[in-house]
Each structure stands twice: as C-alpha cells, then as structure tokens.
Amino acid sequence: MASEKTDAIMIRIVEFSESSCIATMFTRDFGKIGAMVKGARRPKSPFESAIDLLTISRIVFIHKSSDSLDLLTEAKLQRRFRAATRSLPHLYAGYYIAELLDALTHTGDPHPDLYDLTQETVIQLDQLQDPLSLIARFELNLLRMIGQKPSFKHCTLCGGEIPQQPRIAFGQLSGGVLCRQCRVGQSRVISISWGVLEAMRLFSVCDTPLPSIDSVVLGELRGVLNNYMANLMGRRPRMQRLLSVLGRPTTVRDDALSLLRKADQTASPNPRKSTNERPDKDVLDESKIAK
Ligand SMILES: [Zn+2]
C-alpha cells in the first residue's frame, strides 16, 4: 500500500466514531478520494483544523484497494475557508461548490484543472467577491471539464448556428440551445434571453477576470443553471434552495440577505452553528470536534 502526497480541498466530512471521521476530499493528483481520519475528533488531534469544510491542505494518505477507504495519515493546513465566519452568501456558495464536486466527480478520476479552479474560487469567495458570479463561472467550467458543457452557439440537435434574437429555446435535456425547427416536440425546453446566453459564454472561460454581469441577468442565469444542474444530477442539489434567494433581483436579494444575517446574529455569534438552514446534514458538526 503506497503512501501518496497531494494537495486537497475538504468537500465532505462525516462522523464515524467518537474519535474518527470519514473525509471526502477533492485532490489535485488523484481526484476525489474518501479517507478514514483516525483520531480527528480527539482533543489535540494531529490534524488540527485541517479537517474542516473547504480547507486547503497538503495531505499524505495510504491508498487502499478500490473497495475500501483510504487512510489519511497527515494533513498540513494551507488555507482555512475564512468566508465561513464572515458572510452567509459566501458560505452557502462554498458549500454548494463542495456539493457539486462531491456529486459530479468520480473517485480516483484526477482533474488538476478543476482542482485549480476550485482552489481559485474558494480563495475568491474568501475575498468576498460576488458569490453568484463565482458559482456561475465555477459551474460552467466544471461542466466543460467533465464533458457536460451546454451548447451556446449551435443547435444541440442539428448543429445549425443560432442567430441573435431576444429569446432562445434552451433544452435542459438536450444540453443547450435549440433552433426553431428542432425545439418542436422536445420536452423540458425553456426560453432564455440573449443576455443570459451571453453571460453563459462569458462565464464559461476561467482564465479571464470575473465578468461583471447585470444583477437581473445573473438572477435569470441562476434559474437556468439551477434546472440544468438538477437535471444533470437527477436531483436538486441541497444548497440550491439557498442560492435561489441570492439570485433574485437586487432589492429582494438584499432584503433576503439582511434577514438571513439578522436571524443569524440573533441566534448565535457564530454563523456556522446558528443557521436553521443547515446546508448539509452530512457535514461534520464542528461543535463536537476538538480543536
Ligand atoms: Zn436545430
């Protein structure tokens, strides 16, 4: 059993016993791995704060056979997900990214490009950049990297180029835009604005600065991506309900956010423990972990 070293982002943590947990990590060199972390929950754990959602660590693990969990032997914390204690929208966006990585990547299937994008996105969330723009860019590049990128320019069925027009048919099942002829008889076809299509094109590259998109267009895009991701996953991601609040037009969104923040402040000084909208029951209950 070989000992392996790589960079990892923590995407799911589940309690296993009084002292141990099972950590799902997205690694740079091995893709998603699941590892037993013995002693993670003991006081003075050797892993300290590395076992926390969206932390970035340099890890050493023992790779077991395909049907058993790997064993984490070292985790040197490189970066905490600090947005978690500063802003609920950024916390939700981070949790959503972790949920997508867990659901849409396969164990042992490396995607260094996706690892780099995830790390960059987590850092930008930490810097409190616009969470809706960051997750839209993350989703569209994730889709491209796993071979599920929607078609924006050519009809998904006949390949014909789609001319500019105010609204375009978008097939949730066919995976992209449809021309007038091909949309007939297709199910789960929605109508999207040209602006949303343009925004999708801009967000689907990740080596340029984050584009600045009008908030109404961003809200519409959020709706399109919510449905697209749910169709792809065969279920609605658990974090989507919270993201849809962020996706409403600015005034509604600000009201909802201020309500969320107020509810949060009255309940507890620590936003991660207080919210009733517990984003993921599988996420390790931090209050029970010894630091
Ligand atoms: Zn067509």
Image: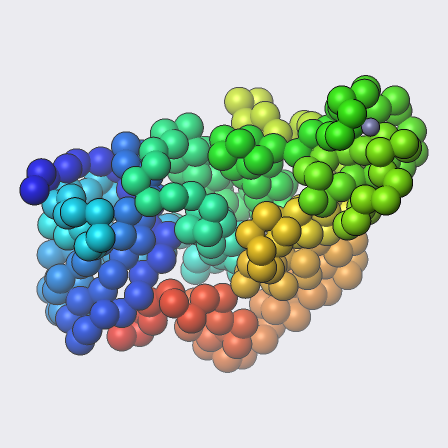
Quadrant where the C terminus sits is bottom left
Residue at 77% x, 50% y is 188
Q: Does residue 93 appear in this view?
A: yes
Q: In which image quadrant can residue 27 be found? A: top left
Quadrant where the N terminus sits is top left
Query: Relative to 118, does residue 179 appear above or below in the rendering?
Result: above
Considering depth in this image, is 136 or 226 the residue closer to the camera?
Answer: 226
Residue at 27% x, 57% y is 23
Query: Which image quadrant shows ligand 1?
Result: top right
Considering depth in this image, is 95 or 29 the residue closer to the camera?
Answer: 29
| Residue placed furthest toward the bottom | 267
Horizontally, residue 173 falls left or right of residue 63, namely right
Query: Relative to 254, does residue 1 appear above or below in the rendering?
Result: above
Q: In which image quadrant can residue 53 be found? A: bottom left
Percent position of residue 35, x then y: 22, 53
| Residue placed furthest toward the top | 161
Query: Relative to 134, does residue 161 appear above or below in the rendering?
Result: above
Considering depth in this image, is 75 or 227 the residue closer to the camera?
Answer: 227
**How are the residues colored?**
rainbow
Residue at 57% x, 22% y is 208
Considering depth in this image, is 21 or 156 the residue closer to the camera?
Answer: 156
Percent position of residue 218, x then y: 73, 44
Q: In which image quadrant can residue 59 be found? A: top left
Horizontally, residue 102 falls left or right of residue 61, namely right
Residue at 78% x, 25% y is 158
Percent position of residue 203, x then y: 64, 31
Horizontally, residue 194 falls left or right of residue 100, namely right
